[in-house]
Amino acid sequence: RRRIAHNAELGVDLIKVMASGGQITPNSPPMWQSQFSLDDLKLIVTEADRYGLDVAAHAHGADAIAAATEAGVTTIEHCTWLGDGGYDCRDEVAKRMADQGIYACSTMPPRWRDFLDRIGPQRAEHVMHRLRWMDELGVQLITGTDAGVPRSDFDGFPDALGVYEHLGFDRERIIEMATVTSAAALGVADHD
């Protein structure tokens, strides 16, 4: 509560929570493992709402995605659907995301082809499948690159959009995702 209040006082645009582990911080939990309970996430959303702030949940893990969805976050960053030992795509959670209007940002790096080669064919297929699958279930996809991490430059955003064309999205839809839908997710759709 104090951290959210302090950040709101500083004028932040939103609250971001590491709902599950990442892979950059040394000795941090595995990517699939939740770092906050459902009750904690609900508290974060409630407190952020008191200040008119949305919540973005960094969530690779399927359990964290489910908890973030139940808590009512605005966006789920990465939305990888990892479980302990593999992938764990859950139709009922994705459908709930769609019903609640929760956006999923794939955070695809600008050099996405190199990324897919680096993670290997099985994981690459999951990355591609989950985006198609979420789209088919009605989850609103937004675009992002996770800029600032290794191999994801701040000026590479246009290159990252190529993954959606590779997936079969038409260019008009890709531009809409990168502009109109992303602006709505950020709460700035009515800005000129």
Image (cartoon, rainbow, N blue to C red):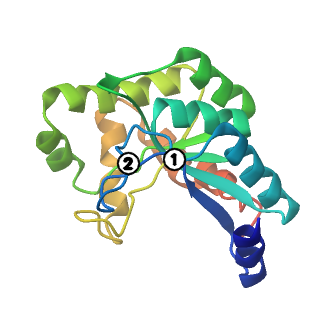
Residue 127 in percent (x, y) is at 31, 33
- Residue tagged 2: 29
- Residue tagged 1: 35
Structural distance between the alpha carbons of marks 2 and 1: 8 Å
Residue in the picture at 24% in, 48% down:
112
Q: Tag 1: residue type?
A: Gln
In this view, the residue in front, 139 or 80, is 80
- In the displayed structure, 184 sits above or below 129; it is below
Quadrant for the N terminus, please.
Answer: bottom right
Quadrant for the C terminus, please.
Answer: bottom right
Tag 2–tag 1 contact (CB < 8 Å): yes
Q: Look at the image and tell me whether residue 70 can be seen.
A: yes
Residue in the picture at 30% in, 26% down:
126
Residue 147 in percent (x, y) is at 37, 65
In this picture, residue 117 sits left or right of residue 94: left
Residue situated furthest front in the rendering: 27
Residue in the picture at 67% in, 24% down:
96
| Badge number at residue 116 | none
Mark found first going from the N terminus, 2 or 1: 2
Q: Residues within 10 Å of mark 2 (few under 14, many from 20)?
A: some
